[in-house]
Amino acid sequence: EAQVTQNPRYLITVTGKKLTVTCSQNMNHEYMSWYRQDPGLGLRQIYYSMNVEVTDKGDVPEGYKVSRKEKRNFPLILESPSPNQTSLYFCASSPVGETQYFGPGTRLLVL
Amino acid sequence: EDQVTQSPEALRLQEGESSSLNCSYTVSGLRGLFWYRQDPGKGPEFLFTLYSAGEEKEKERLKATLTKKESFLHITAPKPEDSATYLCAGYSGAGSYQLTFGKGTKLSVIP
Protein backbone atom coordinates (compact mmCIF):
# COMPACT_ATOMS: atom_id res chain seq x y z
CA GLU A 1 0.00 0.00 0.00
CA ALA A 2 1.33 3.41 -1.02
CA GLN A 3 1.73 5.50 2.09
CA VAL A 4 3.57 8.08 4.13
CA THR A 5 4.30 6.97 7.67
CA GLN A 6 5.32 9.04 10.67
CA ASN A 7 6.62 8.04 14.08
CA PRO A 8 5.84 8.61 16.81
CA ARG A 9 2.20 9.59 16.41
CA TYR A 10 2.07 11.23 19.83
CA LEU A 11 4.92 12.64 21.86
CA ILE A 12 5.15 14.50 25.16
CA THR A 13 8.56 15.91 26.02
CA VAL A 14 10.21 18.63 28.09
CA THR A 15 11.90 21.83 27.01
CA GLY A 16 15.41 21.28 25.69
CA LYS A 17 15.30 17.51 25.24
CA LYS A 18 16.31 16.68 21.67
CA LEU A 19 13.84 14.67 19.65
CA THR A 20 13.43 13.26 16.16
CA VAL A 21 10.22 12.61 14.28
CA THR A 22 10.67 10.13 11.46
CA CYS A 23 8.94 10.21 8.09
CA SER A 24 9.09 7.50 5.48
CA GLN A 25 7.41 7.03 2.10
CA ASN A 26 7.27 3.96 -0.13
CA MET A 27 6.29 5.67 -3.41
CA ASN A 28 9.78 6.62 -4.62
CA HIS A 29 8.83 10.31 -4.53
CA GLU A 30 11.56 12.91 -5.04
CA TYR A 31 9.85 15.65 -3.05
CA MET A 32 9.24 15.52 0.71
CA SER A 33 8.13 18.22 3.08
CA TRP A 34 7.31 18.95 6.71
CA TYR A 35 4.39 21.12 7.86
CA ARG A 36 3.06 22.21 11.18
CA GLN A 37 -0.61 22.92 11.79
CA ASP A 38 -1.82 25.27 14.50
CA PRO A 39 -5.34 26.51 15.25
CA GLY A 40 -6.09 29.69 13.34
CA LEU A 41 -2.82 29.53 11.40
CA GLY A 42 -3.42 26.65 9.07
CA LEU A 43 -0.69 24.50 7.55
CA ARG A 44 2.73 26.10 7.36
CA GLN A 45 5.75 24.60 5.69
CA ILE A 46 8.85 24.04 7.83
CA TYR A 47 11.37 22.45 5.46
CA TYR A 48 11.27 20.65 2.16
CA SER A 49 13.52 18.46 0.07
CA MET A 50 13.57 18.21 -3.72
CA ASN A 51 15.74 15.07 -3.65
CA VAL A 52 18.47 13.26 -1.71
CA GLU A 53 20.89 15.70 -0.06
CA VAL A 54 18.83 18.69 -1.28
CA THR A 55 16.90 20.50 1.43
CA ASP A 56 15.65 24.05 1.89
CA LYS A 57 13.74 26.22 4.33
CA GLY A 58 10.03 26.75 4.20
CA ASP A 59 8.10 29.49 5.95
CA VAL A 60 8.81 28.58 9.59
CA PRO A 61 12.22 26.79 9.81
CA GLU A 62 13.47 28.29 13.09
CA GLY A 63 14.18 25.65 15.73
CA TYR A 64 14.07 22.71 13.29
CA LYS A 65 16.57 20.67 11.30
CA VAL A 66 16.12 18.08 8.59
CA SER A 67 18.25 15.68 6.61
CA ARG A 68 17.67 13.66 3.44
CA LYS A 69 20.24 10.88 3.22
CA GLU A 70 17.91 8.39 1.57
CA LYS A 71 15.08 9.02 -0.86
CA ARG A 72 12.44 7.37 1.30
CA ASN A 73 13.25 9.05 4.65
CA PHE A 74 13.02 12.66 5.78
CA PRO A 75 13.39 13.02 9.57
CA LEU A 76 12.52 16.22 11.42
CA ILE A 77 14.86 17.10 14.27
CA LEU A 78 14.15 19.43 17.16
CA GLU A 79 17.50 19.95 18.86
CA SER A 80 16.16 21.98 21.79
CA PRO A 81 12.37 21.93 21.76
CA SER A 82 10.44 24.81 23.28
CA PRO A 83 6.75 25.09 24.25
CA ASN A 84 5.99 27.17 21.12
CA GLN A 85 6.81 24.08 19.06
CA THR A 86 3.82 22.29 20.53
CA SER A 87 1.84 21.52 17.41
CA LEU A 88 0.50 18.91 14.99
CA TYR A 89 3.15 17.96 12.46
CA PHE A 90 2.63 16.47 9.02
CA CYS A 91 5.06 14.99 6.55
CA ALA A 92 4.14 14.91 2.86
CA SER A 93 5.65 13.49 -0.30
CA SER A 94 5.09 13.71 -4.05
CA PRO A 95 6.71 13.58 -7.43
CA VAL A 96 7.96 17.11 -8.08
CA GLY A 97 5.13 19.38 -9.18
CA GLU A 98 2.38 16.89 -8.50
CA THR A 99 -0.11 16.13 -5.77
CA GLN A 100 1.36 15.92 -2.27
CA TYR A 101 0.31 13.00 -0.09
CA PHE A 102 0.27 13.49 3.63
CA GLY A 103 1.16 11.26 6.54
CA PRO A 104 -1.16 10.68 9.53
CA GLY A 105 0.41 13.37 11.70
CA THR A 106 2.47 13.59 14.89
CA ARG A 107 0.99 15.44 17.83
CA LEU A 108 3.78 16.99 19.90
CA LEU A 109 3.46 18.56 23.34
CA VAL A 110 6.50 20.35 24.78
CA LEU A 111 6.26 21.09 28.49
CA GLU B 1 3.55 37.19 -1.49
CA ASP B 2 1.37 34.24 -2.42
CA GLN B 3 -1.93 34.10 -0.54
CA VAL B 4 -4.86 31.72 -0.43
CA THR B 5 -8.06 32.76 1.32
CA GLN B 6 -10.95 30.43 2.01
CA SER B 7 -14.51 31.38 2.88
CA PRO B 8 -16.56 30.87 4.85
CA GLU B 9 -14.47 29.75 7.83
CA ALA B 10 -17.32 27.49 8.94
CA LEU B 11 -20.48 26.27 7.27
CA ARG B 12 -23.40 24.34 8.71
CA LEU B 13 -25.73 22.61 6.27
CA GLN B 14 -28.74 20.42 6.65
CA GLU B 15 -28.37 17.03 5.03
CA GLY B 16 -29.29 17.43 1.37
CA GLU B 17 -28.73 21.21 1.33
CA SER B 18 -26.26 21.96 -1.48
CA SER B 19 -23.70 24.75 -1.18
CA SER B 20 -20.27 25.96 -2.32
CA LEU B 21 -16.98 26.68 -0.62
CA ASN B 22 -14.75 29.42 -1.97
CA CYS B 23 -10.99 29.60 -2.38
CA SER B 24 -9.54 32.84 -3.72
CA TYR B 25 -5.85 33.01 -4.51
CA THR B 26 -3.12 35.43 -5.40
CA VAL B 27 -0.42 32.98 -6.43
CA SER B 28 1.77 34.41 -9.15
CA GLY B 29 2.01 32.05 -12.06
CA LEU B 30 -0.34 29.48 -10.55
CA ARG B 31 0.62 26.01 -11.77
CA GLY B 32 -1.90 23.99 -9.75
CA LEU B 33 -4.74 24.38 -7.26
CA PHE B 34 -5.33 21.50 -4.86
CA TRP B 35 -8.31 20.59 -2.71
CA TYR B 36 -7.92 18.39 0.35
CA ARG B 37 -10.30 17.05 2.97
CA GLN B 38 -9.11 16.82 6.57
CA ASP B 39 -10.81 14.99 9.40
CA PRO B 40 -9.96 16.03 12.99
CA GLY B 41 -6.48 14.93 14.05
CA LYS B 42 -5.75 13.28 10.69
CA GLY B 43 -3.63 14.12 7.68
CA PRO B 44 -5.14 15.98 4.71
CA GLU B 45 -6.62 13.61 2.15
CA PHE B 46 -6.26 14.56 -1.50
CA LEU B 47 -9.44 15.34 -3.43
CA PHE B 48 -8.68 17.25 -6.65
CA THR B 49 -5.99 19.03 -8.63
CA LEU B 50 -6.96 21.78 -11.08
CA TYR B 51 -4.42 23.20 -13.50
CA SER B 52 -6.14 25.76 -15.69
CA ALA B 53 -9.09 28.18 -15.66
CA GLY B 54 -12.28 26.53 -16.78
CA GLU B 55 -11.25 23.10 -15.57
CA GLU B 56 -13.76 21.07 -13.54
CA LYS B 57 -13.42 17.79 -11.67
CA GLU B 58 -16.02 15.68 -9.90
CA LYS B 59 -16.02 12.95 -7.30
CA GLU B 60 -19.25 11.66 -5.84
CA ARG B 61 -21.05 14.68 -4.33
CA LEU B 62 -18.10 17.04 -4.82
CA LYS B 63 -17.25 19.17 -7.83
CA ALA B 64 -14.28 21.53 -8.03
CA THR B 65 -14.00 24.38 -10.50
CA LEU B 66 -11.28 26.91 -11.24
CA THR B 67 -11.32 30.46 -12.60
CA LYS B 68 -8.42 32.86 -13.00
CA LYS B 69 -8.89 34.21 -9.46
CA GLU B 70 -10.71 31.58 -7.45
CA SER B 71 -11.81 28.03 -7.08
CA PHE B 72 -15.08 26.62 -5.83
CA LEU B 73 -15.86 23.31 -4.20
CA HIS B 74 -19.52 22.56 -4.83
CA ILE B 75 -21.18 20.03 -2.54
CA THR B 76 -24.40 18.56 -3.85
CA ALA B 77 -26.90 16.98 -1.45
CA PRO B 78 -24.33 16.56 1.33
CA LYS B 79 -24.46 13.78 3.89
CA PRO B 80 -23.23 13.84 7.51
CA GLU B 81 -20.12 11.89 6.47
CA ASP B 82 -19.08 14.89 4.34
CA SER B 83 -18.47 16.82 7.57
CA ALA B 84 -14.77 17.77 7.64
CA THR B 85 -12.44 20.69 7.07
CA TYR B 86 -11.77 21.37 3.40
CA LEU B 87 -8.42 22.89 2.50
CA CYS B 88 -7.25 24.43 -0.72
CA ALA B 89 -3.66 25.12 -1.68
CA GLY B 90 -1.94 26.87 -4.57
CA TYR B 91 1.35 26.00 -6.17
CA SER B 92 3.36 28.49 -8.21
CA GLY B 93 6.00 26.10 -9.46
CA ALA B 94 8.65 28.78 -8.89
CA GLY B 95 11.46 26.33 -8.20
CA SER B 96 10.59 25.28 -4.66
CA TYR B 97 7.27 23.54 -5.28
CA GLN B 98 5.97 25.21 -2.15
CA LEU B 99 2.26 24.88 -1.51
CA THR B 100 0.46 27.88 -0.01
CA PHE B 101 -2.50 26.67 2.03
CA GLY B 102 -5.68 28.45 2.99
CA LYS B 103 -6.91 28.10 6.56
CA GLY B 104 -9.78 25.87 5.55
CA THR B 105 -13.55 25.76 5.72
CA LYS B 106 -15.02 23.62 8.46
CA LEU B 107 -18.15 21.96 7.09
CA SER B 108 -20.78 20.44 9.37
CA VAL B 109 -23.67 18.53 7.81
CA ILE B 110 -26.56 18.04 10.19
CA PRO B 111 -28.84 15.01 9.76
Image (cartoon, rainbow, N blue to C red):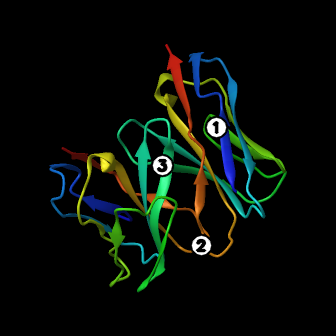
Judging by the rendered image, the residue that carries numbered circle 3 is B45
Report if the CB atoms under discs 2 and 3 are less than 8 Å apart.
Answer: no
User: Given the image, on which type of amino acid does mark 1 rest?
Assistant: Leu
Q: Quadrant of residue B52?
A: bottom right
Which callout, 3 or 1, points to the residue nearer the camera?
3
Say left or right for B11 vs A91. Answer: right
Return the mark for residue B96.
Answer: 2
User: Tag 3's secondary structure?
Assistant: strand
Judging by the rendered image, the residue that carries numbered circle 1 is B62
Say left or right for B66 vs A21. Answer: right
Give me the chain letter of mark 1: B
- Give the image location of residue B76, x and y in percent: 67, 28
Say left or right for B102 vs A24. Answer: right
> Is residue B8 something that shows in the picture?
yes
Which callout, 2 or 3, points to the residue nearer the camera?
2
Q: Earlier in the sequence, mark 2 or mark 3?
A: 3
- Please give the name of the residue rendered at 39% of the width and 65% of the height, measured from the top-left corner: A2
Is the residue at mark 3 from the same chain as the one at mark 1? yes
- The CA distance from mark 2 to mark 3 is 22 Å
User: Tag 1's secondary structure?
Assistant: strand
User: Given the image, on which type of amino acid does mark 3 rest?
Assistant: Glu
Q: Nearer the viewer, residue B60 or A80?
A: A80
Up/down of B64 relative to A32, above or below: above
